Structures are given as structure tokens and as C-alpha cells.
Image (cartoon, grey):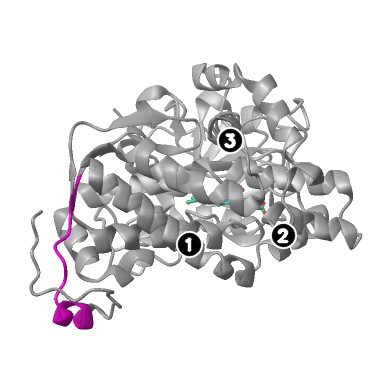
Amino acid sequence: MPDSRLGEAVPAGGVGDKGGAAGTGRAAAPVRTTDPFADDFLRDPFAYHAELREAGPVVWLERYGSWGMARYTEVHEALRDRQTYCSAAGVGLSDFRKQTPWRPPSLLLEADPPEHSRARKAVARALSPRTIAALRDEFAREADSLVSELLARGTVDGVTDIAEAFPLRVFPRAVGITQDCGEQLLAYGNMAFNAFGPRNHLQAESMAQAQPVGAWIAAHCTREALTPGGLGDRIYASADAGTVSGDEAALLVRSLLTAGVDTTVIGLGCALDCLARDPAQWQLLRQDPSLAGAAFEETLRYASPVQTFFRTTTREVEVGGVRIGAGGKVLLFLAAANRDPRRWPDPERFDITRRANGHVGFGYGIHACVGAAFARLEGEVLLRALARQVGSLEPAGQPVRRLNNTLSGFAALPLTLRPAGRRTQSTAIQTGEAVPVLAEEADDRG
Ligand code: HEM
């Protein structure tokens, strides 16, 4: 259960000694002994978020000597104000100015301008809207054929058979990796996202494979390993143009391999869980598959596959009357902000018709997810394929949560899928869909 030291406050001066806050006479910050990286917390983070949010605009997380923000306004502001809240000291608990990072830092995620701006330009150019749009037909075909295969089986695991299977069919090829590489990409993502947390058992377990998996990833970030025309190769085009070096291009490809798979796997799994547990929302999507993009967006708000990131303060800053000193680590609870009742009406309700725009599931500001369009495309085409072909989507057993220091989703998600009946012409016209075959009548066998 959530830590209940609500109302307890740090006496003025008390926090400053531990957390790098400076000055006296500031309002006290509520202290929390809650461990946001403990198994209990990670198993059901949302149960703890409300308490952290209500405690105040900023709390002191005693266990890690870190500040925490769980309300939308403050999280959004910290993401926006990159001059006060920097990323170059690491966006995990570890402070790169004091501890050696587990790998050379990311030129994007763990960098500040001007270095960040240069790197970001190279990756944004490689993942341009036109490039992503050109992937749509292929992704949609893959989604359709995957869903047909699954329907033939009936009961499947939503994680391995759908949420992992789909990105692993489309992502490596889009980046330019032709080898079978699912195991390596998933293992690498798992360790990278665990590494943002403390040195707990999750980090230790995932890091057991750091050497071979890290070597595999490094070998596949070279230009020679990437097929011409893929997203990785397009990053090397910036090296040709002289805007980044060859070594930098390799690290930028590494960013795609780190952040591009596990995140979407978790996001798709969460979408399946939300829809399977809420037949009314599933029916809404079935009736109007054009809601697929909105359903994925609402999943990102509601479930927040990426739950947290840290920032480090570069100067003293006052938040809600609490002075945070320079050099303080600040844990931003993106997931808590995405359900803050100050920002969202009925935030605990999964509602695919709501305007979920403005959620911070992809971050915000200069570090906002550079792969968002890619992830959105995957989410949209997969949910659309399910909505068109699947009549009923139902839980077939207890889901198993997957514990990770940063990501929140499922390790297993038993589901039963039954085919949709063929649609009548009038159904198709109402939903605005192009259907290849016109049937006599709708027959929902689900
Ligand atoms: C549902 C899927 C995804 C989610 C929820 C997600 C979430 C996020 C978040 C919250 C950030 C902000 C980090 C910060 O502010 O410190 C971020 C950054 C980033 N994401 Fe994603 N992401 C997803 C998919 C992807 C994909 C598919 C790619 C690559 C193809 C990708 C590549 C990146 C990179 C490279 C950054 C760093 C950007 C920068 O610092 O400028 N992500 N992502």
C-alpha cells in the first residue's frame, strides 16, 4: 500500500542537506519513504501515484535522496524547462557527474543542447514524417496477416504472440536489420530501461546478459550491418553530410535499437489489456476502426508504458513553494501526470473517445519521443487490423505483470480471439471503411 506519511513535512533546511537544496525559509516538502522501484510499487504503480500527487507539487523521496513530481503541471513544466532540468547528468537515478554510466551515454536522451540539437536533427531527418508514412502499407499488411494467423489459433498470449511479434516483424526490417534479432533487442531494451533505476534485483538480473547482448547491439549499429535505405542507413546519411561523425551515427542507431522495441511492445500489450478488459470500449473500436489511433493514444495516457524519467537541476528553482537546490535529481512520474485529475476529467477511465492529446507518455519538449510517429503507426495499424478482423477479444486467464524500473506492462496476457462476422455493405458505409467483400449479413459469432 502507499506510504502514508502524508502531512509529514521536512523542516526548513532539512532537505537541503540531503538533496542539494539551498537557502532557508522555504516551505517544507512532504517526505515520502515510498520506494518507486520496489516490486510492490512496480506491480501496481497507479495505486501509489494518487498518494504522491496529493502529497504536494513536489515531494522528497527519502530512500533515494531525490525529489519527485507527480502532478501534471509540474511534470510538464520540468520537461519543458530543459535549462533548469537537464538530461546530460543522466535521466536515471545515477548521476553521470559522480558515477560512471553503464555504457557511453546516449547522444540524444542523455544530452543537452547544443550537442543534443545536432544529434536530434540527424535522427529526426532519418525518421521524417514522409519516411514513416511510406512504411504504412507494409506495416498494415503485416498487421493483417499476423491477426489472421492468430485467429486460426484462437487462444494466444497477447504479449509474445501479438505485442512482441508485431514490432519484431516490422521494426528490425525498417531500421535495416535482416537477421533474426528479437531476443537481443528485447534483452537490450529490458536492461537499458532497468538501468534508469537503482541497483536493485531487476537491474542486476537484466544486466547479467550485458556483455554478449551489448556486443551484438554494437555490431549491428555499424553501417555495414545495416541494409541500404533503412532508418539506420538514413542516419549515416548525416555522417556523409558531415553533420555527425561516423561514431556518432553508430550511437544514434543504438538509440533506435534501445528505445524502439521494448517501449512499443509494452504499449501494445497495455492496449490489448485495456481493450480486452473493457468490452464497451472494444465494441466502440470494432464499430469504428478509425478510432484505432485514438485508442492507442488513450492507452499511452492511461497506462503510460514509460512511467518515469529523471532530470537533474542546473540551478536553484522554486516549485510550489519548495526550493530545490542545484544538482538535485528529480523523478518525473509521467504516468501519475497522465492521470492527474487536475488535468484530466475522469482520469481513471479508459476512454478511446477522449482527447488524450497533451499526455506526457511520449515526454514533452526537446526530448519528446523522436520515434513517436513510428510507434503511433505500429499501434494504429495493429489495433485497426484487430478491430476489422476480430469479433471478440477476451481475457483467457490472469495477466502477469512485467516488472521493470521504467516500463510498466505485462509479461503474459492470455487472450481469446474470435473472428468477426463478415460485414454488411451498410455497416461498412457507416464506419467509412473500404471492405473487400460484401456479405449478406453481419454475423457476430463472438
Ligand atoms: C509506445 C512507444 C514509445 C513510448 C511510450 C516512448 C516514450 C518516450 C519518452 C517518454 C521519451 C522522452 C524521454 C525524456 O524526456 O527524457 C522518449 C524519447 C525517445 N524515444 Fe521514445 N517511446 C516510444 C517509442 C519509440 C520508438 C519506436 C523509437 C525509435 C524508433 C523511440 C526512440 C526514442 C528516442 C531516441 C528518444 C530520445 C529523444 C531525445 O532525447 O531527443 N521511442 N520516448
Alpha-carbon span between mark 3 and mark 2: 19 Å
Q: Earlier in the sequence, mark 1 or mark 2?
A: 2
Element type where label 1 sits in the image: helix
Does 420 lie within the magenta span?
Answer: yes
Q: Nearer the viewer, mark 1 or mark 3?
A: 3
Q: Nearer the viewer, mark 1 or mark 2?
A: 2
**Looking at the picture, how far across and down is residue 319, in whole percent?**
56, 51
Q: Which mark is residue 181?
A: 3
Query: On the image, numbered disc 1 is attached to which residue?
Result: 377
Query: On the image, numbered disc 2 is attached to which residue?
Result: 229
Q: Residue at coordinates 52% horizontally, 53% vertically from top-left?
A: 75
**In the rendered structure, are the residues bearing label 1 and label 3 in contact, judged by CB atoms less than 8 Å apart?**
no
Q: Is residue 304 above or below residue 185?
A: below
Element type where label 2 sits in the image: loop
* Image quarter of residue 341: bottom left
Residue in the foreground of this view, choosing between 73 and 211: 211
Q: Earlier in the sequence, mark 3 or mark 2?
A: 3
Element type where label 3 sits in the image: loop
